[in-house]
């Protein structure tokens, strides 16, 4: 897990900045219930997406457990932040219209406690909006990188905490049903072969984290043999789903 207190200083600049935040917020908005008056953004980070969800008549609360992230978010959401763990929210049951969590579940060893807490605080008819299948976002468009990594991603998809079919199944046991979905682009974030190798070295290619050393060595060999090593392939397409509480 990253040290998010340290990451807060450069987080926005290294994660797509304002363009990605704008795209993410617009996608979230498409999935929010009509007339949502109370929206909780779990793992709000620097608040770069959270502040874009504010509307007249809507209360938006950002929640994060990192003091560094909350300090950055305070400039964007003065008075609208709570320090708390996403599995232990200081809120009454059924008190919010929507829970939003962007790029959180893929970091967790087990997303079920967060899903359960979201279900607890949602009113009936409220929705949980969350990103899923983050690893696949970089390969959503056809490319040589997508084809090269495809078999490994398929083999280990079910081991990833934000694997959509598994999440949807587990959420159903909590009274959350799939209601809608959308995608949004990570503008300027497409990876090159060399960039994907660097991400692999940092442990940021989850399917490779579960693969055997022999499988990873073969991916490395094939990546190094691709042409245009510095040329970025298509931008990622991040997937968002809405799970409605029944």
Image (cartoon, grey):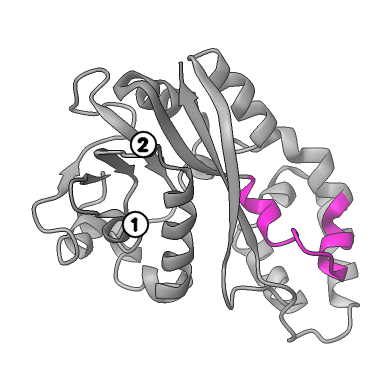
Q: Residue at 84% x, 71% y: name it.
A: 223
Percent x, y of residue 145: 82, 67
Horizontally, residue 58 falls left or right of residue 35, namely left
Q: Nearer the viewer, residue 29 or 112?
A: 29
Horizontally, residue 162 falls left or right of residue 79, namely right
Please tell me in which quadrant of the rendered image residue 123 appears.
top left
Q: Nearer the viewer, residue 132 or 150?
A: 132
Q: Residue at 33% x, 28% y: name it.
A: 87
Horizontally, residue 22 falls left or right of residue 72, namely right
Residue at disc 1, secondary structure? helix
Please tell me in which quadrant of the rendered image residue 193 appears.
bottom right
Please tell me in which quadrant of the rendered image residue 37 appears.
top left
Residue at disc 2, secondary structure? strand
Q: Residue 146 magenta-drawn?
A: yes
Residues at marks 1 and 2 touching, judged by CB atoms closer than 8 Å:
no
Magenta-colored segment: predominant secondary structure = helix
Residue bearing the label numbered 2: 99
Residue 4, numbered circle: 1
Q: What is the tally of numbered marks visible in this picture?
A: 2
Percent x, y of residue 176: 50, 21
Percent x, y of residue 150: 85, 53
Is residue 34 in sight in this rendering? yes
Q: Residues within 10 Å of mark 1 (few under 14, many from 20)?
A: some
Mark 1 or mark 2: which comes first in sequence?
1
Q: Residue at 77% x, 39% y: name it.
A: 156
Report the Cα–Cα distance between label 1 and label 2: 21 Å
The segment highlighted magenta reads 133-150
Is residue 212 in sight in this rendering? no
Q: Residue 42 magenta-drawn?
A: no
Percent x, y of residue 43: 34, 46
Horizontally, residue 194 falls left or right of residue 59, namely right
């Amino acid at each position: 897990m990253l040290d998010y207190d340290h990451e807060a200083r450069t987080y926005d600049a290294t994660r797509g900045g304002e363009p990605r935040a704008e795209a993410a917020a617009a996608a979230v908005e498409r999935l929010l219930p009509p007339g949502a008056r109370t929206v909780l953004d779990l793992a709000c980070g620097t608040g770069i997406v959270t502040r874009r969800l504010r509307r007249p008549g809507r209360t938006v609360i950002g929640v994060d457990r990192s003091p560094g992230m909350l300090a950055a978010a305070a400039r964007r959401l003065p008075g609208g932040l709570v320090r708390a763990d996403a599995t232990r929210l200081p809120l009454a049951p059924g008190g919010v219209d929507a829970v939003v969590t962007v790029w959180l579940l893929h970091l967790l060893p087990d997303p079920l406690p967060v899903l359960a807490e979201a279900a607890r605080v949602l009113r009936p008819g409220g929705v949980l909006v969350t990103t899923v299948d983050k690893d696949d976002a970089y390969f959503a468009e056809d490319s040589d990188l997508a084809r090269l990594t495809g078999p490994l991603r398929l083999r280990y998809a079910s081991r990833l905490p934000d694997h959509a079919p598994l999440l949807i199944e587990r959420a159903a046991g909590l009274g959350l049903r799939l209601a809608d979905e959308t995608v949004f682009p990570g503008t300027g974030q497409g990876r090159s072969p060399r960039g994907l190798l660097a991400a692999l070295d940092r442990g940021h290619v989850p399917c490779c984290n579960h693969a055997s050393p022999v499988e990873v060595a073969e991916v490395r060999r094939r990546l190094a043999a691709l042409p245009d090593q510095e040329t970025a392939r298509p931008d990622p397409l991040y997937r968002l789903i809405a799970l409605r509480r029944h």
